[in-house]
Image (tube, helix red, strand yellow):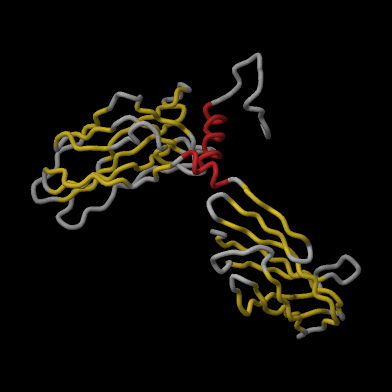
Amino acid sequence: MAQKGIIKNTTTADISAENLAAVFYAMLGKSGIVKAFNNLACTKLTDNSVQLDSGVYSLKGFMLHVEAGTAITLNVDSGTDGQNRNDLVVAELVKNGGGTGIDTLQFRVVKGTSTSGTATDPTLTQQDVNATGTTRQEALYRIKLTGVTINVIEMVTTLIDNADTITDKLVIESGGNAADGYYRKYGNGDIEFYGQIDLNGTFNTGSTAIFERGWPVACVTVPVITMTVSMYNGTGNYNDYRATAHLSDATTGNFYGHAHCSYTASTQYYMGLHYHAKAKWK
């Protein structure tokens, strides 16, 4: 099915976990611990167990919850004297487990390999469960064992402030015009600029045209710019030319450079420079 209404009245229960996960993932924009309750804080109980406090984890939009006012205990296999090991506390989704149509979504510990040297993390299965993948593991914490002792527990995932994340993705201001270029400001301080610069003249093989443009609004970092050049020969044929754009410099005030016609089968009178840039406005 190419499209599906998710928030709507219906006479059948036709909303799947995949549908809801897609919505949550679109809203949050990433996997991680969602800032709520006790943020799934992980603490050592013994050298063979750790505790996850209350909180919510989003695994590509599939939500796993330790309920408020509760905690869960995860077992850790014993370490080995004289050896080091890294284990990972993971969220694990197995879709359609055992062919029964029932997904398994749980927190568990994935055991690493013991070594006398520097320990490395175990390899996780990370299929794309928003597409056709069936199994995905994502690490929340790294448990470092030295000998039989759990020495360190460190967070390796993102703590998502859900309110800020949604605001970050919002376009809070946009504007501009064809002559000065266009812009979009985002809540997280990102800004993007885009537009087209018309270069008119007589262009043969080896010809160049200089361009310069200021940004339509202020930015506080130097924009990172991508550019392409198009040329039209008046007959709808775009295959008899080669043209490139070359940036000389970019500042927080403007950018400039030149377009170069490296080959054309006949004299041309127009090149169009198309640009897109990203920077910070705050």
Residue 219, located in which quarter of the rendered image? bottom right
Given residues 207 and 279, the one toward you in this image is: 279
Q: Where the N terminus falls, by quadrant?
A: top right
Q: Is residue 249 rendered to the left or right of residue 86? A: right
Considering every residue shown, the one lying at the far bottom of the view is 206
Q: Where does the image place residue 95, in percent across and percent down from the top left?
A: 46, 30
Q: Position of residue 234 (x, y in %)?
A: 90, 70
Which of the 4 image quadrants contains residue 100?
top left
Q: Nearer the viewer, residue 47 or 82?
A: 47
Note whether 242 is above or below 143 in the view shown: below
Residue lying at the far left of the rendered structure: 81
The residue at the far top in this view is 11
When the figure is inspected, residue 85 is found, relative to residue 41, above or below; the finding is: below
Q: Residue at x 40, y 30 (%)?
A: 64
At horizontal 56% and vertical 34% (from top left) the residue drawn is 23
Percent across and percent down for residue 88 are 28, 42
Between 95 and 38, the residue placed more toward the observer is: 38
Residue at 65% over, 51% down: 173
Position of residue 184 relative to residue 63, above or below, is below
Q: Nearer the viewer, residue 182 or 56?
A: 182
Rendering coords of residue 229 (x, y %): 73, 70
The image shows a total of numbered marks equal to: 0
147 to the left or right of 259: left
